[in-house]
Image (cartoon, rainbow, N blue to C red):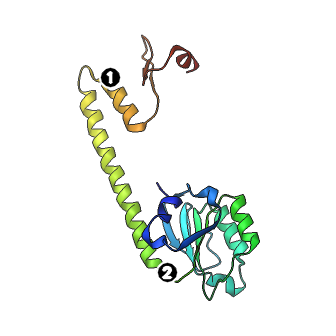
Amino acid sequence: MLTVREALRRPLFGDATVVAGQDGLERGIRWVHVLEVSDFDTLIHGEEMILTTGIAFNSGVISPVRFLSKLIELNASCLCIEIGPYFDNVSQELVELSDRHRFPLILFRSTVRFVDITQDLHSLIINNHHRLLEDLESVSRQFHRLTLSATGTSKVLKLLHESTSAQVVYQPFQGQQVFVPAMDAHERRQF
């Protein structure tokens, strides 16, 4: 999954500054969403990068702190605010809240085109998802081919390990356990 840190490396974030929540830069981003309203409980699913100009803060209906608190509660990935006529400074309370929850707070100090950011990151997310599906299809074909061969068990276990990067333990009904990759006797006993 795309992380906040990876998104910040994109050219459109060249002038962006992380002002708080730096410990949360590994949070995943499933989607990018522009929020300019105060009542958004049903508008996000979680793990979104939120972009805003802060116009909702001027309505008096929601404060920046309450806006941020709701995003944290709804498991958003981070908040990007454009500094401008609707939002001009970050309070210490916002910084402390972001830091406490390891929630990245990112500022754009000049006007940015949210449409360019969403298009760039959505393309990246969709292309990554497409690549994962292609990889899954390839692994699926390999598993199918191996399960049809008489000597496929060890090769299936090796492919399972390679495709998941996880320790594989095979316990047949009769016989010894097989560990891929191999483990020493002490580690095997722990399993």
Judging by the rendered image, the residue that carries numbered circle 2 is 112
Q: Is residue 154 above or below residue 130?
A: above
Residue 155 seen by the camera:
yes
Quadrant containing the C terminus in the rendered view: top right
In percent of width and height, residue 155 lies at 31, 26
Q: Is residue 61 left or right of residue 36?
A: right
Amino acid at circle 2 = Val
- In the rendered structure, the answer to whether residue 172 lies left or right of residue 84 reads left
Q: Is residue 35 visible?
A: no
Q: Viewer-proximal residue, 54 or 13?
A: 13
Q: Quarter-wise, where is residue 142 in the image?
A: top left
| Residue 164 - label | none
> Could you say which is closer to the camera, residue 166 or residue 75?
166
Q: Residue at x 72, y 72 (%)?
A: 66
Which residue reaches farthest bottom?
85
- 60 lies left or right of 1: right
Quick one: SS at disc 2? loop
Against 21, residue 145 (above or below) is above
Question: CA separation, marks 1 and 2?
Answer: 55 Å
In the image, what residue occupies the spot 42% across and 37% down? Answer: 164
Q: Are marks 1 and 2 in contact (CB under 8 Å)?
A: no
- Residue 153 bears which disc, if any? 1
Identify residue type, mark 1.
Answer: Thr
